[in-house]
Structures are given as C-alpha cells and as structure tokens.
Image (cartoon, rainbow, N blue to C red):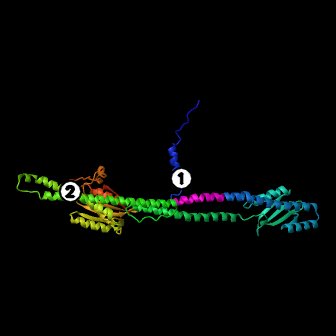
Amino acid sequence: MEFPHSTENTPPPGRWRRLHERLVRRILPRSLLGRMLLIGFIPLLVTQGISLELFYGNYLQIVSRRLSGDMATTISLTLDMLERYPSPADRRWILDDVGRRAGLIMTLREGESLQRSGTNHVLGPIDDDLVRDLRGTVRWPTFVDWKQPHRRLVILVQLPEGVLQVVAPRKRLDVAPVWLFVAWASGSALLLFLIAAVFMRNQVRAIRRLARAAELFGLGRDTVPIVPDGAQEIRKAAISFNRMRDRINRFVEQRTTVLAGVSHDLRTPLTRLRLSLAMFPRTGMVRAESLQPDIADMIGDIVEMEHMIEGYLSFARGEGAEIPTVIRVEDMFEEIVTAMRRVGAHVAIRAVRPSELTITGRSNALRRVLSNVIENARRHADRIELSAERGRRQVILYVDDDGCGVEESRRESVFRPFESGEEGGTGLGLAIARDIIHAHGGHIGLETGPLGGARVRIVLPE
C-alpha cells in the first residue's frame, strides 16, 4: 500500500525561484560592467587553475620522478660499489670518482648513526618522490635534509660502518621555483583582466550615455542627438533612440500647433458673440429688458470659455517653445509673490533651504504651475505660504494655505481636467499644473498642511 508524500514542509516552486533570484542578486554585481568583468574573470581563473593542475599534476611530477629516480639510482650504485670494494682506499676512490662525475659531495662518516629517517618536507612533490625512490632502491635507512643553506640538500644513509653523507645542489632535483610559476599565472591573469576591463568599460560607457540621454529626454531636458558609439548593437540602439526622439518631438510639435490653432480659431467666434451680445439693445423694448439677465449669463459663459481657451493656448505655447534653464528657486518665489499680491492674494515666502537652491526646467511653465496652485488656494484660504527644501537628488516645493483643506477621497480627482470645486472655475488649473510637473519628470500631490489647510507638494529632479 502506497502512502502519499507529505508536502507541508516543501516550499512551492515559486518560493524556490524567489530564493534563487534573491541569492543571485546578492552574489552577482549590480552593474553591467561588474557582471561583464565577472563573466570574463571566471573563465580566466578556471583556465589558470586547469593549467596549474596540468603543470603540477603531469609535467612537474614526471620530471620530478625522473630526477629523483636518477639521484636514488646514483646513490644505490655507489652503495653497491662500496659494499663490493670494502677497503678504505677503494672506498675513498669510489666516493671521489662518483662525486666528481655526478656533481655530488660524498663523505663516509664512520661510527655515526642516524637520529631520524624520512624528510623535512618542502613545497611540491620533489621530496616525496625522492624519499619513495630512496626507499625503493636503498635497503638502508635514509634521511633527506632540505633545509640547508646555499640551495643545497643533504642525503644521509645509515650503513653498518657509519653514515654516508651526500651533498647535492637543489637544481639537480628542483625544476623551477613554485612561486615563479604562480606569479606568472597570477600576473598574466591580472594583465588580461585589466585589458578586458578597459575594453568593457568603453562599451558600458556608451550604454550609460544612452541611459543618461533617455533620462534627460524623459525629464523634458531635450539634448542633442546621441553620437552612435561602441559595439554594433549599442550603435543600433543609439540610432533607434535618435529616431524615436525625433518622432516624439514631431508629435509634440504637431499636437502643440493643432492645439494652439484650435484655441486661436475658437477665440474669433467667441469674440464676435461677445460683441454681438454687448451691442444687443438694452432699452426701448420690454422684451429686451427681460432678456438682460440671460444676456449677462451668456456673456459670463463666454468669458469663462475665453479664460479656458487662454489657459490652453498659453500652456501650448510654453510647452512647445521654451527651453529648460537653471532656475533659482528663491528668485522665482519672489516674482510669483509680487505678481500674486497685485491681484490681492496674501502670499508670503516662509523658507528656502538652502537659499541658493536651484532647479533645471522651463521657467515660464513652472511659474504657471505655482500661479495656478496659488490661484486655486486663494479661492478657499486667506493666507498662503511658499517654501522649498532640497531632498535626495530632488527639490521639493510646498504651497500651504489656511483654508478648509481637501478631503482625502478627492485629493486625486482634483487634478483631473474640468474638476472644479467652485462655481465659475474652469477645472484646468491643477490639471495643467500636473501635466507640466510630469513633463519635468516630477510629481505633484495634496497633503494636510501645517497651517490647517491644504498643502500642495511638488517634487522636481535637480
């Protein structure tokens, strides 16, 4: 009988995927340059590791075994000759002749004995190979001392009559210093990595330039066309961006021209209607006198329509022709306060921190935003205050009033076109303000202000 497996403690596949993505994000670099360098560095590191393993696992071990085997064979033959010719004179001749021919210094120290056997290890397979070959060819105890000055080694062999000492240069067994090969591998890897980093940085610079141009274009700070640079794919992306930029500019220009033309054409019949109503006879007939209230209402509607069209027309002009410049916030506040005070608004500047705070944008369009916001607040409040501060790579403008405020449920709807909370309003002031702020890459919203009324919070990039 089979029982179903319990899945209570098994995470769902989606969770495993999220955990894997989170782990990858923590390990991998965030920048494209870092990831490209990592892609180039890991294969380079693996290649150097493989070459190191092949060198020490194949070539170095083979050469080391051959050299150590040759040394062990020489010592073994010498011991056989010493055993066959035991006279002191023969032994001295054998040791001198073999030492001269093999480049060794052989000495027989009679009456001495070994204190230990084996070897004092060094880095690499050389010592193990020599000890193994000595044990295989020499039947007497041996000890190999690698820690001798002047790059020498001493091989001691325990014989019945004493200890045979063999002094040999290390170059007879050592192929090359290990650190030399490690330094060569590390240095070549570092050099290749730096060369790859230089080339990859040039490619990433073109991508960063494209991203910067796209960001500035989205903020309304139109720049000159990008010069295609870098790899073929990056050049194609830059060319496509330039074409998109031209198409969007043409679309905005055409839309602005059509909007301005429609607004201008509508003003002509409205002006004629207004003149006709103004010239309508006001006396002489009872019926004419009874029509005077209706005529006044129609004239008021025409004025409202002219005000609406004027708003569209001025917005279209500002959006299509104005060039972004650096604006000092305090100077802009002072100009707006002076202009609004002329029409009876009680506006004051509370604070600008720091005093040299600047933003980059269309000056007339931003003044229109603040004027529309202040005009809207003036209908509901007696006192209005302006302030500004610097945020994280952004500038925040505040317009506070002491009015009744705006309900939280209506804080989004008041920015829609033709949404007016007061009779006689066009409902376009805040809508136009939001469009201008969004065109600058910013955000505008309503909050509860410190004066008890509404607070308009405008966030713009520096």
Marks 1 and 2: in contact by CB < 8 Å? no
Residue 270, given in percent of the width and then of the height, sits at 19, 57
Upstream in sequence: badge 2 or badge 1: 1
Q: Main secondary structure of the magenta part?
A: helix
Does the magenta portion include 420?
A: no
Q: Which mark is residue 24?
A: 1
Mark 2, residue position:
304
Q: Above or below — where is 195 with respect to 137? A: below
- In screen coordinates, is 18 left or right of 180? left
Residue situated in front as seen by the camera: 221 or 174: 221
Residue 35 on the magenta span: yes
- Alpha-carbon neighbours of circle 2 within 10 Å: few (<14), some, or many (≥20)? some
Q: Tell me the crowding category of disc 1: few under 14, some 14 to 19, or many 20 or more residues within 10 angstroms, Cα based.
A: few
* Mark 2 residue element: helix
For residue 453, what is the image quadrant?
Answer: bottom left
Which of these two is toward me, 458 or 387? 458
Q: Helix or strand or loop: what does disc 1 sit on? A: helix
11, above or below 352, in the image: above
Residue 449 visible: no
Tell me the quarter of the image containing the C terminus. Answer: bottom left
Residue 216 placement, left or right of 402? right
For residue 25, side relative to residue 121 (left or right): left
Residue 194: image x %, image y %? 58, 65
Depth check, mark 2 against mark 1: the one in front is: 2
Which kind of residue does numbered mark 1 sit on?
A: Val
Please provide the residue range marked out in magenta: 31-49
How far is the residue under mark 2 from the one under mark 1? 60 Å
The answer to which of 66 and 1 lies nearer the viewer is 66
